[in-house]
Image: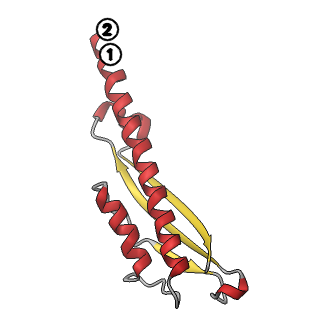
Amino acid sequence: MRPVLMLLLFGTFEISRLWLTVGVVAEAAREGARTGAVNTPFDGSSGSPAVTRMNAVLAGASLTAASTPTVTCSSPCNSTSNATVTATVTVNFVTGVPLLVPLFGATKPIQQTAQMRFE
């Protein structure tokens, strides 16, 4: 009975951590899209304010991106063309409970994308 209770308890903790990670990654994507949408001229390079903002949101939750977050803008990127800025970020979720590896796998990539109109 105890092993089942422990598995249930740790499983609940890990599902909660996974849900929190998904929320933080989604917020980082939204912040990146918003920062990219209001900065003129548009800059989607790896050192841009949008990518820096996404990394700052992830760092606030002690997360790091699995690869460099991307921020792109539809062409032409100006406010008169109704261009959209798209931000994408991926984080690898790693479970610390070995018994849950068959359910989650050792790592689970979490990717979120957000779009906003260029202003």
Residue 106 appears left or right of 77: left
Disc 1 marks which amino acid? Leu
Q: Is residue 71 visible?
A: yes
In the image, residue 76 lies at what x, y percent?
67, 90
Q: Residue at x 29, y 35 (%)?
A: 98
Q: Nearer the viewer, residue 90 or 56?
A: 56
Q: Amino acid at mark 2?
A: Met
The residue that appears at 72% across and 86% down in the rendered structure is 81
User: Residue 92: where, in percent of width, then height?
Assistant: 38, 55
Residue 5, disc: 1
Q: Is 33 placed above or below 24 here?
A: below
Q: Is residue 40 left or right of residue 50?
A: right
- Label 2: element kind: loop
Pointer 1 with pointer 2, Cβ within 8 A: yes
The residue positioned 50% from the left and 83% from the top of the image is: 39
Q: At numbered mark 1, what does the secondary structure look like: helix, strand or loop?
A: helix
Question: Is 92 located above or below residue 75 in the figure?
Answer: above
In the rendered image, the vertical position of residue 19 relative to residue 56, given as above or below: above
Q: Quadrant of the N terminus?
A: top left
Which residue sits furthest top?
Answer: 1
Q: Which mark is residue 1?
A: 2
